[in-house]
Image (spheres, helix red, strand yellow):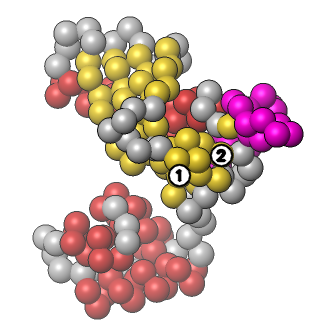
């Protein structure tokens, strides 16, 4: 899918009580805030907050603008839209920095890139130790047909749980039948 051009507008509303929140990368955000991103076919609304010093998308809503039903576009949307990239672009327009006695929108390229990079950061690597712990918990607590409940009990999404299971099988910590 070709790269799409997005129009980005960020706003703060009374229904989202914002406050300055420090980022681990430097700078701060008035968060939570709403970012509305549109292109020719979609409108995506992100609610972005700061959790433990890191920007996080706490919710999003996708609305088709071209009259096509979203139900039929799910695969296209999930393959063609990278929420983390859109969030990084919205953050680049919203991060603040202290400049002497005055606070204002960030102008430092280094700060903006650091904030964007914190969102695009790769997943934490799955070490053998973590996979052994996962495999042990999986053997003890997993109940067929209850994948979502098991994943939640371990602090993962269902997708993350299946990714860990597959990696544990590939590295020999779980067998194919488990």
Which region is colored magenta? 97-118
- Please report the residue visible at 34 percent of the width from the left and 18 percent of the height from the top: 42
Q: Which residue is mark 2?
A: 28
In the image, residue 24 sits, relative to residue 119, either above or below, namely: below
Q: For label 2, count other residues whose C-alpha is less than 10 Å away and answer few (under 14), some (14-19) or many (20+).
A: many
Residue 40 image-quadrant placement: top left
Pinpoint residue 146: horizontal percent, then vertical percent.
16, 72
Q: Which residue is mark 1?
A: 50
- Please report the residue visible at 27 percent of the width from the left and 12 percent of the height from the top: 65
Q: Tag 2's secondary structure?
A: strand
In the image, residue 157 sits, relative to residue 3, either above or below, namely: below
- Please report the residue visible at 26 percent of the width from the left and 8 percent of the height from the top: 66
Position of 42 with respect to 84 (left or right) is: left
Residue 106 image-quadrant placement: top right
Q: Tag 1's secondary structure?
A: strand
Relative depth, front residue between 92 and 85: 92
Residue 80 image-quadrant placement: top left
Pinpoint residue 74: horizontal percent, then vertical percent.
26, 31
- Does 25 lie within the magenta span? no
- Does 103 lie within the magenta span? yes
Pinpoint residue 92: horizontal percent, then vertical percent.
64, 31
Q: Quadrant where the C terminus lies?
A: bottom left
In the image, residue 37 sits, relative to residue 97, either above or below, namely: above
C-beta proximity under 8 Å, tags 2 and 1 = yes
Relative depth, front residue between 176 and 163: 163
List the single residue furthest toward the left.
145
- The disc placed on residue 87 is none
């Amino acid at each position: 899918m070709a790269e799409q051009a997005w129009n980005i507008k960020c706003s703060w509303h009374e229904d989202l009580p914002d406050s300055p929140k420090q980022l681990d990368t430097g700078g701060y955000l008035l968060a939570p805030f709403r970012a509305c991103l549109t292109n020719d076919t979609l409108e995506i609304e992100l609610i972005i907050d700061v959790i433990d010093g890191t920007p996080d998308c706490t919710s999003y809503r996708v609305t088709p603008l071209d009259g096509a039903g979203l139900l039929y576009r799910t695969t296209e949307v999930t393959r063609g839209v990278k929420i983390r990239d859109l969030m990084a672009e919205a953050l680049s327009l919203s991060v603040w920095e202290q400049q002497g006695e005055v606070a204002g929108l960030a102008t430092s390229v280094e700060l903006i890139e650091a904030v964007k990079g914190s969102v695009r950061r790769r997943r934490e690597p799955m070490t053998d130790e973590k996979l052994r712990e996962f495999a042990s918990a999986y053997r003890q607590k997993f109940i067929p047909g209850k994948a979502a409940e098991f994943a939640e009990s371990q602090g993962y999404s269902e997708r993350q749980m299946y990714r860990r299971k597959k990696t544990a099988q590939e590295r020999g910590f779980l067998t194919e039948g488990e």
